[in-house]
Every structure is written in structure tokens, then in C-alpha cells.
Image (cartoon, grey):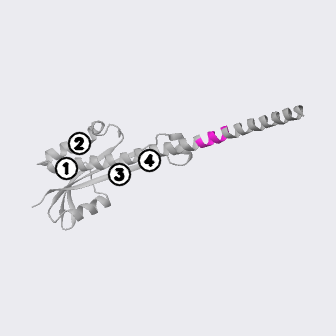
């Protein structure tokens, strides 16, 4: 009887060992999924931060441009925005900034000056809605292409880059 009992116990130990292997595989799968979720959360938080930073940069740059008293000041500020973008946003080194100064005349944007040669449709619509006839305004547009932190994983799922864009339109003078 004791020999039979010992054989049964040995068989039970082998089964228990097999269960430990299953637990290890389950842990590996669960930890991989947890890592993917964590990296996705980090990328999502970083993208939200990038959009927030672009919104702040354009709003502040538009306020500075609107406060400039003459075209020389506005030109210097507009040119220095791109030249000093490493100081403005050190984490967004590939950011592009464009600026425009303009007048609304007969429901059209006229007299475009500075680094932008035209206003994209959404900025044009915002400027026309904000300004009265004969008002002068400024607009700032910032664009940035975000690359995910864990690029290899993102490429497998087709999420390689995301283009971010923010703009701000401010009234400069009213006649």
C-alpha cells in the first residue's frame, strides 16, 4: 500500500509541476499585455502633452505679435519664432511655426505679411469670424510630427507618426 501511495504522490507532483509551467506562460502573456497597455498610456499622455504645448505656444506667440507696435517688430518676432524654437519648446525640436499679419477688408483677408503666404481654410474662417471690417489681426500656426516612444511596437500596428497642429488668431488693432 505504501508503494502505491508513493507512486500516486509522485504523479501528483508531476501534475503540480505542469501547472507551474502553465502559470509561467500565463504570467508571460499577462505581463506582455500589461507592458503594451502601459506603453500605449505613455504615448497617449505624451500626445496630449504635445497638443497642449502647441496650443500654448501659438496663443502666446499670437499675443506677442499682436502687441508689436509696427511691422519691423512683428517681422523680427515672426522670424525669431522659428530660429529659437529649441528655446521655446526644447522637447519639440521638429516643430514648425508660421506667423501672419493681415487686415480684414470687405469680408476678405488682405495685406498678408510675415512668414505665411496664405491662411489655411480653418484659420481664415476663424479670422473672418473674429475680426470686424478694417481690423488688423495676427495668426500663428504651429505643426509637429510626433513619433511614438516605442516605435517598433507602434509600427507593427500601423501607428508610426501623428501630425499635430495648433493655431491662434488675435486682434491687433481696430480702427
The segment highlighted magenta reads 24-30
Point out the image quarter for the N terminus: top right
Q: Nearer the viewer, mark 4 or mark 1?
A: 4
Extreme front residue here?
Answer: 1
| Quadrant position of the C terminus in the picture | bottom left
Q: Residue at x 50, y 48 (%)?
A: 159
Q: Earlier in the sequence, mark 3 or mark 2?
A: 2
> Residue 133 placed where, x, y %?
16, 66
Residue 114 visible in the picture: no
**Label whose residue precedes the other's in the sequence (4 or 1):** 4
| Label 1 crowd bin: few (<14), some (14–19), many (20+), radius 10 Å | some
- Circle nearer the N terminus (4, 3): 4
The residue identified by callout 3 is: 165
Q: Residue at x 27, y 39 (%)?
A: 88
Residue 76 in view here: yes
Query: Residue 134 in the image: x percent, y percent?
Result: 14, 63
Question: In the structure shown, which secondary structural element does the residue marked by tag 4 occupy?
Answer: helix
Give left or right: position of 136 versus 86: left
Mark 2 is surrounded, within 10 Å at the Cα level, by few (under 14), some (14 to 19) or many (20 or more) other residues, namely some
Name the residue that disc number 4 marks. 44
Q: Is residue 174 magenta?
A: no
Classed neighbour count for the residue bearing mark 4: other residues with Cα under 10 Å, few (<14), some (14–19), many (≥20): few
Q: Please say if the residues under marks 2 and 4 sit with CB atoms less than 8 Å apart.
A: no
Q: Residues within 10 Å of mark 3 (few under 14, many from 20)?
A: some
Q: CA distance from mark 4 to mark 3?
A: 16 Å
Q: Which mark is residue 63?
A: 1
Mark 3 or mark 1: which comes first in sequence?
A: 1
Camera-side residue of 104 and 166: 166
x 89%, y 31%: residue? 3
Disc 2 target residue: 79
Q: Are marks 4 and 1 in contact (CB under 8 Å)?
A: no
Amino acid at each position: 500500500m505504501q508503494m502505491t501511495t508513493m507512486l500516486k504522490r509522485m504523479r501528483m507532483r508531476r501534475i503540480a509541476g505542469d501547472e507551474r509551467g502553465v502559470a509561467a506562460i500565463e504570467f508571460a502573456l499577462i505581463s506582455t499585455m500589461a507592458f503594451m497597455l502601459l506603453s500605449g498610456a505613455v504615448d497617449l499622455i505624451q500626445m496630449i502633452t504635445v497638443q497642449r504645448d502647441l496650443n500654448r505656444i501659438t496663443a502666446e506667440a499670437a499675443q506677442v505679435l499682436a502687441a508689436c507696435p509696427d511691422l519691423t517688430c512683428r517681422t523680427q518676432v515672426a522670424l525669431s519664432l522659428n530660429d529659437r524654437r529649441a528655446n521655446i519648446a526644447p522637447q519639440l525640436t521638429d516643430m514648425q511655426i508660421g506667423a501672419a499679419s493681415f487686415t480684414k477688408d470687405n469680408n476678405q483677408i488682405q495685406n498678408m505679411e510675415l512668414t505665411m503666404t496664405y491662411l489655411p481654410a480653418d484659420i481664415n474662417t476663424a479670422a473672418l469670424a473674429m475680426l470686424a471690417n478694417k481690423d488688423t489681426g495676427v495668426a500663428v500656426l504651429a505643426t509637429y510630427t510626433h513619433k511614438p516612444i516605442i516605435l517598433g511596437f507602434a509600427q507593427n500596428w500601423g501607428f508610426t507618426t501623428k501630425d499635430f497642429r495648433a493655431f491662434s488668431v488675435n486682434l491687433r488693432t481696430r480702427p
